[in-house]
Image (cartoon, coloured by chain):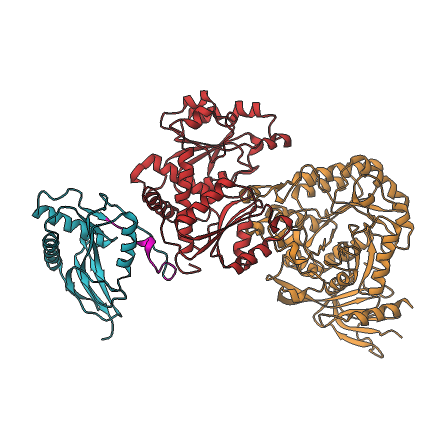
Amino acid sequence: MAESYLIRGASLADGTTSDILLDGGIIAEVGTGLSAAGARVVDADGLIALPGLVDLHTHLREPGYEQSETILTGTRAAAAGGFTAVFAMANTAPVADTAGVVEQELALGDAAGYATVQPIGAVTVGLQGERLAELGAMARSRANVRVFSDDGFCVSDALLMRRALEYVKAFDGVIAQHAQDPRLTQGAQMNEGALSGELGLAGWPAVAEEAIIARDVLLAEHVGSRLHICHVSTAGSVDVIRWAKARGIQVTAEVTPHHLLLTEDLISGYDARFKVNPPLRRREDVEAVRAALADGTIDIVATDHAPHPSESKECEWDAAANGMVGLESALSVVHASVVENGLLDWTDVSRVLSQTPARIGRIRGHGEAIAVGAAPEIVLYDPSASRSWGTADLAGRSVNSPYLGRTLPGRVVATFHHGYATVLDGAVLETAEIAAAAREARA
Amino acid sequence: MRHLLSTRDLSRDEAIELLDIAEDMADVQLREVKKLPTLRGRTVVNLFFEDSTRTKVSFEAAAKRLSADVISFSAKGSSVSKGESLKDTAQTLAAIGADAVVIRHGSSGAPLVLAQSGWIDAGVLNAGDGTHEHPTQALLDAFTLRRRIHGSASRGRGLDGVRVTIVGDILHSRVARSNVWLLSTLGAEVNLVAPPTLLPVDLANWPVSVGYDLDDAIDAQPDAVMMLRIQLERMHAAFFPNSREYSRAWGLDDERFARLRADSIVMHPGPMNRGLEISSRAADSPQSSVLEQVANGVSVRMAALYLLLSGEKGE
Amino acid sequence: MARTVLNHSDISRALTRISHEILESNRGSADLVILGIPTRGTVLARRIAEIIQRIEPDAPVQLAGSLDVTMYRDDLSRTRTRTPSPTDVPVGIDGKTVVLVDDVLFSGRTIRAAFDALNDLGRARAVRLAVLVDRGHRDFPIRADFVGKNLPSATSERINVHLSEIDGAEFVSIEGGEE
């Protein structure tokens, strides 16, 4: 008999206070003064309860790059950050471009039990941008793939992009585009502008992102398909997406926590922890993506959690890898960048970090409002906490966080997935315990 | 001085002090005994991840004339070219007991990364990093200009009001960047002339004026014209159509050279593409300071090493 | 509290006496070079040269110079970075009698460095040393040939030499130390 949990006195996103009973694989009761009979009580006084977070953009590195992260360690990081589902990007080795690879990822995620791992399929074979991968086979596999992306690379060939957009309509799929014109960004090292000129680093111009987005929204309109834009980073991209939405084009967009908080001037010391693709941009761009998230032009926040071993970051800038870990810190960074200044309230946060990403990714059992009968996926967050971010706050295998040494608000106190706890009292629970709970939940 | 990483960090007083010490070092170069015992027992490592015989030889001469032990470490053919990281190399040099590391690296910022890493305690001297900075080149250029203009009365002086035009591939030039910051710190007025493709997209923070027309710049009669080396590979990346067109528009040919004032100084950091960015007549004229720049390089690098290696650690 | 030990006219008398002694020991001003050690030694050397040129009108015109010893010091990594001063030697020193001039003789390290510096300039026939103040506490077997004033002091005391060309005033004072 699986353990049941009574969450006592949590603040819901709408501001009301309530008890929540997780029992029998669902949210069994919501209300005040619920009976604790037989349930383990979690005191949630002062904590906000949000539906379990859903990350549409995670790099779990397995198979192939297990020195950076594995499905187990990556989902531990997810749980620590309050996530109960992560969409695993396809740039593994082998690439997730066949039903076999995506089914293996799904199974490893289920076995680990920290969060639902929903594989993303590659758009093209080997991410080479030449031939379509077996999109249909991945869609019909046990992994039920609906999101396809060559992330890390742009599907830059316009014809291939058009075909991919059209093809996935057959099974309600979506193409998540990494918008980066490859020719305009050859050798690019940071945002192109005044600072890149001073630092002598090759520029990554905003237009290289904006031009691809403009092309792709027009393609999506022409073929009537769903398009999702990964990691929007510039004010110009926001303008293009806003225009496309006004025209009724089916486009959705994500922004990363780091693009909501950090600006390019951090690069002045050539510290490779701040090297990421797309690069950190200007203050004006940060303001624009924040406003776009607030007004709905940008639909969701997705982490682009990208673990790398220390040797890939402890080196000269050109040689360093792109990417930052972000699962553990995402909610705190969203809190710091758009909640503290009033742009978003906690209802908005549950929309951009849970409900909408689940809807875009067509994943079931996630992103449901906290109500009787809903899936028991919940995160409890202490908004009054504050901590100086350190490696002890990271739960994955890699420590390439840009926030180390920075004070961030809030703390994930507990995470519940499939009705069992993956995090309690701010600590990620033991691997064996979680695997056992997951087996029991499946039974 | 703990490190010398860029000219941008130098105050006017610091820059003038370094140039004045270079004057003392230049005096020593005129003596029969050119060597000073100053850095006896100290170890200077020349760590060159890029080929540059000229700069390496200049630093070697500077260190040796100050009696330092010099270890030259070229990336080519060493473990560095076999994938050894900057970190491992730095820790090796620390174990050897390097007091100063002179580093040339193809990646912008690598000297700063080395200086801040904690991998090695030595002073770090940037001998050119990527397309970022090349501070000793700018210092020797400023030294050369100051001597040409003020002669034996150079000590203590800046370059106030001196008009310098820098021509060529500004975008990829560490020499240009270091010169822009240093010359303006010393009071000079810097004018950049280049094809638009070879200028950074946003120069709003640079203390310079910018133009595309070399003839206009020549007609403005600058006190000095600094021609940068143009890399022919650039034309394959569509920065300019071909060498003929580049030379015609942005080369210091005989005709343009003849229009300069007789006391205008013609500079080039070397190595020159004769007939491309500079004509032989201009390069070999008495107005050219190309060879003085090379000689002055040793004096300036002696001064930099002296400032880096004298005084207590951390000063 | 600083206490004045030499005033303006004391300094002037001392330099005049030293100039006479130099001429006497060198038997005139032939083949003489007077090199001051920056900063105040250079000023003193120039003054001594002027006095000698007044006493002996046919003394060499280029008599005084400056010898910077910064690059020859043995304590460069122990103290804060010193900014060197120019060396200005008016004539070659080969075969000459060089009189080194400094303001205060203390440990002798500066003079030791000066020997090395001189050695790199050529081969002097003889080297002499003139100082305005000898305060004792030598670390090297060095002795001044011409001394303005012997001033026994504690190592904790400071001797300050002020010269009008540099400091706008002209006196020598002693300060600090145990009361």
Q: Which quarter of the picture shows residue B233?
A: top right
Colour for chain B in the figure: red
Q: Can you give x and y, in whole percent of width and height, for residue A289 in the image?
A: 67, 48
Q: Is residue C20 above or below residue A177?
A: below
Q: Is residue B186 left or right of residue A375?
A: left
Closer-to-camera residue (A374/B20): B20
Q: Colour of chain A?
A: orange
Residue B119 percent coordinates (x, y):
55, 59
Q: Is residue A387 left or right of residue C32?
A: right
Is C77 in the magenta?
yes
**Which residue is painted at 46% across and 39% down in the image?**
B180
Residue A375 appearing in the image:
no
x%, y% of residue B88? 60, 56
Residue placed at 7% from the left, 48% from the top? C55
In what quadrant of the picture does the N terminus of chain A appear? bottom right
In the image, residue B53 sits, relative to residue A335, either above or below, namely above
- Viewer-side residue, C122 vs B118: C122
Chain represented in cyan: C
Q: Position of residue A162 (x, y in %)?
A: 82, 37
Whether residue A39 is visible, yes or no, is: yes
Observer-nearest residue: C44 or A281? C44
Residue C179 left/right relative to A53: left
State the extent of the magenta-drawn residues as a range. C66-78
